[in-house]
Image: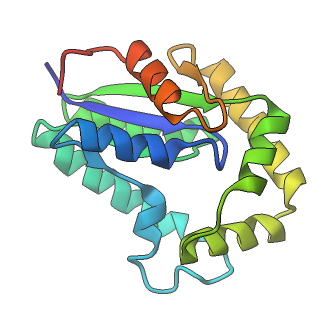
């Protein structure tokens, strides 16, 4: 079976990173390519210009390519609300003989916005991200991101949509497993 690049997409605070960590833990050899964790590895990541994605995304693409080329799975928790960004990761999967699996974790808009508001700030990245969202417009910005993500889902008929209920980590994880093609792989 070919390796998989499993992209966990969804609004901020929906549980992508939590589920990716569980997935990697339960599937030995899987790279948990948490793009948010990569930010802290690059000097100047706290700069307010918001351009760090221009540095981190190519690093993520290269890391995914290397791991997939070795025949191993990658799980990537990252909000991508532009089809063009998704297509870059989809191409890396194809170029390395891997299957691209797109899972979108969703709740309704109100719940999604509230989940970000309730999310515990327990790292420098969390604090930085919360401040960045506030600078970009807070709830209005998050609502626009949610709408853009919905447009991406509509444009990507192969995306697997999974309901993410608050506090239901194991149930959401089980739902992701149920929709995942290639279940026999570990």
Residue plotted at (27% across, 44% down): 25
Q: Position of residue 166 (x, y in %)?
A: 66, 36
* In this picture, residue 73 sits left or right of residue 106: left
As displayed, is residue 32 above or below residue 125? Answer: above
Q: Position of residue 159 (x, y in %)?
A: 53, 20
Position of the N terminus by quadrant: top left
Residue plotted at (22% across, 42% down): 30
* In this picture, residue 109 sits left or right of residue 140: left
Residue plotted at (82% across, 68% down): 134
Residue 92 figure quarter = top left
Residue 20 figure quarter = top left
* In this picture, residue 1 sits left or right of residue 6: left
Position of the C terminus by quadrant: top left
**In the foreground, 56 or 139:** 139
* In this picture, residue 56 sits left or right of residue 159: left
Q: Position of residue 39 (x, y in %)?
A: 46, 70
Total marks placed: 0
Residue plotted at (62% across, 30% down): 164
Q: Position of residue 98 (x, y in %)?
A: 23, 29
Residue 92 shows in this picture? no
**In the foreground, 45 or 173:** 173
Colour scheme = rainbow
């Amino acid at each position: 079976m070919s390796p998989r690049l499993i992209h966990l997409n969804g609004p901020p605070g929906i549980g992508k990173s939590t589920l990716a960590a569980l997935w990697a833990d339960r599937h030995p050899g899987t790279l948990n390519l948490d793009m948010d964790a990569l930010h802290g590895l690059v000097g100047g990541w706290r700069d307010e210009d918001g351009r760090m994605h221009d540095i981190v995304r190519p690093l993520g693409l290269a890391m995914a390519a290397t791991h997939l080329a070795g025949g191993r799975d990658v799980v990537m928790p990252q909000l991508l609300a532009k089809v063009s960004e998704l297509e870059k990761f989809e191409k890396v999967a194809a170029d390395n003989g891997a299957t691209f699996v797109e899972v979108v974790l969703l709740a309704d808009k109100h719940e999604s916005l509230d989940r970000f508001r309730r999310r515990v700030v327990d790292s420098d990245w969390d604090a930085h991200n919360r401040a960045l969202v506030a600078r970009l417009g807070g709830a209005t910005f998050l609502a626009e991101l949610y709408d853009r993500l919905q447009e991406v889902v509509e444009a990507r008929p192969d995306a697997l949509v999974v309901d993410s209920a608050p506090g239901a980590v194991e149930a959401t994880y089980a739902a992701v497993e149920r929709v995942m093609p290639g279940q026999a792989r570990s």
